[in-house]
Amino acid sequence: MGKTEQMHIRVEPELKTEAEAVLSQLGLRTTEFVRMALRQVVLQRALPFTVRIPNAETIAALNEPTHNLKQFESVDDLFADIEARRDPRIPREATE
């Protein structure tokens, strides 16, 4: 279906500027966001999802290399590794 309907809204200039800056960081134009938000309202029959710009800690975690991650053949091997690295000074009950 073609896009034939228009929506006109009025907002404060500062709100528009700040929102456009955030959306730009997320790679979205305002019209794309509005279309996406409206689609979510229809699909969920509720207010749309939460989208946030990640903080510095999250960005750092997302950028960590994954090629050096330890791999295990089984869940038992994973738990054995965790247990082997557990600090013996900390009572086991404190970690459960």
Image (cartoon, grey):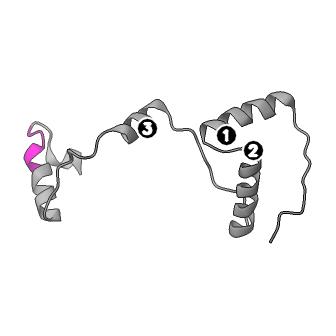
Residue ID for mark 3: 58
Q: Is residue 6 left or right of residue 80?
A: right
Q: Is residue 56 left or right of residue 84?
A: right
The reply to whether callout 1 and callout 2 are in contact (CB within 8 Å) is yes
| Picture quadrant of residue 24 | top right
Q: CA distance from mark 2 to mark 3?
A: 25 Å
Residue ID for mark 1: 23
- Above or below, 63 against 49 in this view is above
Q: Residue at x 50, y 33 (%)?
A: 55
Q: Is residue 93 left or right of residue 30?
A: left
Q: In the structure shown, which secondary structural element does the residue marked by tag 3 occupy?
A: helix
Q: Is residue 6 left or right of residue 50?
A: right
Q: Residue at x 83, y 63 (%)?
A: 3
Q: Position of residue 80 (x, y in %)?
A: 9, 56
Query: Which one is nearer the viewer's eye here, 83 or 64?
Result: 64
> Which numbered disc flags the more N-terminal residue, 1 or 2?
1
Disc 2 vs disc 3: which is toward the camera?
2
Disc 3 vs disc 1: which is toward the camera?
1
Q: Which residues are magenta?
A: 83-88
> Which numbered disc flags the more N-terminal residue, 3 or 1?
1
Q: Neighbour class for label 2 at 10 Å: few (<14), some, many (≥20)? A: some
Q: CA distance from mark 3 to mark 1?
A: 18 Å
Q: Neighbour class for label 3 at 10 Å: few (<14), some, many (≥20)? A: few
Residue ID for mark 2: 30
Q: From this viewpoint, which residue is outermost toward the bottom?
A: 1
Query: Which amino acid type corresponds to the residue marked 3 in the rendered image?
Result: Thr
